[in-house]
Amino acid sequence: MNFRSSYIAIGAILVMGFAGSVQAAIPIERWQQASGAQVYFVPSPGLPMVDVQIDFDAGERLVPAAQAGLAQATASMLQQGVAAGGGQPAMDENQLGEAWADLGASFGASASNDRFSVNLRSLTDPKLLTPAVQLAAHQLGHASFPDAIWQRDRARWTAGLKEALTRPGTVAALAYQKAVFGSHPYGQEPDAQTLAAIGVTDMQAWRDQRLAPCRAKATVVGAVDRAQADALVQTLLAQLPAASSGACPAPAQSQPVPALTQATVVNQPFAAAQAQVLMGQPGYARQDPRHFAFFVGNHILGEGFTSRLVNEVREKRGLSYSVGSDFSPGLAGGSFTIGLQTKPEQAQQALKVAQDVLRDYVTRGPTEAEMNAAKANLTGSFPLRIDSNRKLLLNVANIAWNNLPLDYLDTWTRQVNAVTAQQVKAAFGELIHPDRLAVVLVGAQPAADAAAPAGDSK
């Protein structure tokens, strides 16, 4: 069995290997390195693998509006070639791909609104792990950002954005984002103009200035000990320009997403078999103490096949195959969204039913029976949230990113069970304003031609 096939085989049994221990306490260790980087470590000795995620405060919310997409472009170009340095040779994108395949390891980078993240997965055999960590560090510190590759990728990206605008779901999502976030950076999206304003020197500067070890949050899960985890993170961060200069940029500041002051409706014609319906408003920041009330409350309102929205919109009236609600809390806030797809002639009716369900839920709150069912469902499925090293890594990285307590996973079930119906009602009543929602309909038949509204939804 070669490195590539052994990697696949071990990955396949990784889920099985961790599943048996998910009920035990999660032993998260945390410490700070001399550089300022914070390390969160969970030993998982069952299989000879290690997963690493390092998060930097360098997401899209910090990018100038005129260069929307810069953080994402930088993440992509980190993987498109390296210059010689740190004792390693230059490699183009093909050589890099072959190098990672030969190591049976993977390395990637991505950027969201808040975070710039890099991920490494490798076997822990020193003959493989050591060169994998060195190669990842080399890419972080010496990515070559070849202009010819960026010109090619920018053309592909621009063409992809243009093609995406032929799909009603994309059109609705962009309109909704603008309606909810307005000019806040969370509402910025790359387009042909902003991508044209991004050059490789901008990406180099973003990497050099924003990927600062002093503010990195590193999460390590796998079959290594604490000393190995510490050395691994030190090596990964050592070649970043900010590490060499000792510079530590000031913490990024972001204004919270402002609340909506009035209701808005965007009704955009679109020739499609299914109309897209979105409605919502700004949500809450992840560190909000009401998080569990929103989490449990949303499960009752619009998560899963037993939710109120599914019952009223789909089961009772057959207006949509899928309907649901969601909170997406971030550092500066987030959004609360109800979404569904339906036939164009039913869109106005489906919208009214969903609005009625939300208004009733905010006014009356959940029943005790709904609370008990939601808690049983959520706590019963908790082991599935951490039944692999990959899922555990994501959960611990979220703990690190949001400065949550180290026993967060151990107390998760208790905190869910502690939520009361009164707390859910109060939290939704304070945050959700049914009379100030942003509503987006794409491809919906005009109201005057739509079917008559349904009766009381509850």
Image (cartoon, rainbow, N blue to C red):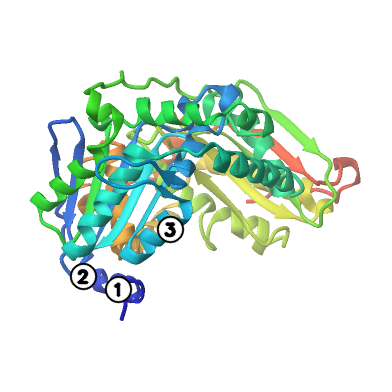
Q: Quadrant of the N terminus?
A: bottom left
Q: Which residue occupies 21% across, 23% down?
A: 246
Could you tell which of marks 1 and 3 lies nearer the N-terminus? 1
Comparing 150 with 18, the one in front is: 150
Furthest residue in direction right, as rendered: 449
Say if residue 455 shows up in the picture.
no
Comparing 94 with 113, the one in front is: 94
| Residue kind at label 2, given as amino acid type | Leu
Q: CA–CA distance between discs 3 and 2?
A: 25 Å
Q: Which residue is mark 2?
A: 47
Task: Check contact, mark 1 vs mark 3: CB within 8 A.
Answer: no
Comparing 442 with 217, the one in front is: 217
Task: Check contact, mark 2 vs mark 1: CB within 8 A.
Answer: yes
Could you tell which of marks 3 and 2 lies nearer the N-terminus? 2
Graded by Cα atoms within 10 Å as few (under 14), some (14 to 19) or many (20 or more), the crowding at tag 1 reads: some
Q: Which residue occupies 69% across, 48% down?
A: 169
Where's residue 225, x and y in %? 10, 56
Q: Which residue is mark 3?
A: 97
Q: Which mark is residue 10?
A: 1
Where's residue 4, x and y in %? 36, 72
Label 1 secondary element:
helix
